[in-house]
Amino acid sequence: MSADDTAGRRAQLISNLRTVRERIDTACRAEGRRPTEITLIAVTKFFPASDVRLLAELGVHDIGENRDQEAREKVRDPSLEGLSLTMHFIGQVQTNKCASVVSYADAIHAVDRPKLVAALDRAAASAGRRPKVLVQVGLDDDPGRGGVSPAAAGRLADAVRQAASLELAGVMAVAPLGGDPDAAFARLRTVADGIRAAHPGATWLSAGMSGDLEAAIRHGATHLRVGSAILGSRPALR
Ligand SMILES: *Cc1c(COP(=O)(O)O)cnc(C)c1O
């Protein structure tokens, strides 16, 4: 990228970040929450390592990715060397990708089945890593979209807690398409409260994207996963 292109992209990211931070501040103020309680994860899927570097220079060190191959290549990009990034893997994890994902992910957000817990635990143990793990809760009745049912979430959290090489961090969800995000996130909060009662260390509530971050903040989100509002619109899904 030429110096002019980099400067233009930087200006765009600064402006988008300012807008997102204002939205977070406003939503927090309305709830009597502090913006410092909230971690903003910039979801950089489809965007190049150069954007990750600019975001880090602008103070955003929490980076989210949802495809293993893309994430792995990006984090190894020489231009990111020396940046202290926290990598969040927010996509569905295939069991045969566990070794790869644990090699770079500090937190894995979409863990929704016992088999995956076991596979991640084995992969983390052999890599000498101990990633944070979030239980993905399904908030609609479509099992295809991932997530354990609210009724089974507690049992899955117990399994993560018992896995020696995983750290139970909390819960995660995506609001159902076209549904009311407030209703969905209220359900999520009930599940999160139940898990927290059993496991006080499970403090993370990962919810809220570009379109619904205010609703997530109203229902206790601690981690927002924001892509397009920061980086711009992505090309259509591959
Ligand atoms: C892509 C993605 C996001 C970010 O979505 P935006 O609407 O672009 O903010 C958040 N969470 C998950 C799981 C994603 O895959």
Image (spheres, helix red, strand yellow):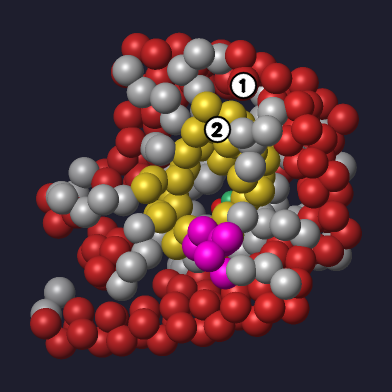
Query: Eyeballing the image, is 23 above or below 112?
Result: below
Query: Is label 1 within 8 A of ligand 1 (CB to nearest ligand atom)?
Result: no
Task: Name the spot of residue 111 as percent of width and height, x first.
Answer: 61, 32
Which secondary structure lies at badge 1? helix
Decide if residue 199 is on the left or right side of residue 15.
right
> Amino acid type of disc 2?
Val
Foreground pick, 134 / 238: 134
Foreground pick, 91 / 15: 15
Query: Residue at label 1?
Result: 160
Which secondary structure lies at badge 2? strand
Q: Quadrant of the N terminus?
A: bottom left
Decide if residue 202 is on the left or right side of residue 184.
left
Residue contact at pointers 1 and 2, CB within 8 angstroms: yes
Quarter holding ligand 1: bottom right
User: Mark 2: few, some, or many residues within 10 Å (few <14, many ≥20)?
Assistant: many
Residue visible at 44% across and 78% down in the picture? 17
Query: Eyeballing the image, is 69 above or below 22?
Result: above
Residue extent of the magenta highlight = 35-40
* Residue 143 drawn in magenta: no
On the question of residue 18 being in view, the answer is yes
Cα distance in 3D space between marks 1 and 2: 7 Å
Residue visible at 64% across and 36% down in the picture? 202
Residue visible at 77% across and 21% down in the picture? 155
User: Mark 1: few, some, or many residues within 10 Å (few <14, many ≥20)?
Assistant: many
Task: Name the spot of residue 58 as percent of width and height, x first.
Answer: 31, 72
Decide if residue 225 is on the left or right side of residue 68.
right
Foreground pick, 228 / 60: 60
Query: Residue at label 2?
Result: 133
Query: Eyeballing the image, is 75 above or below 124?
Result: below
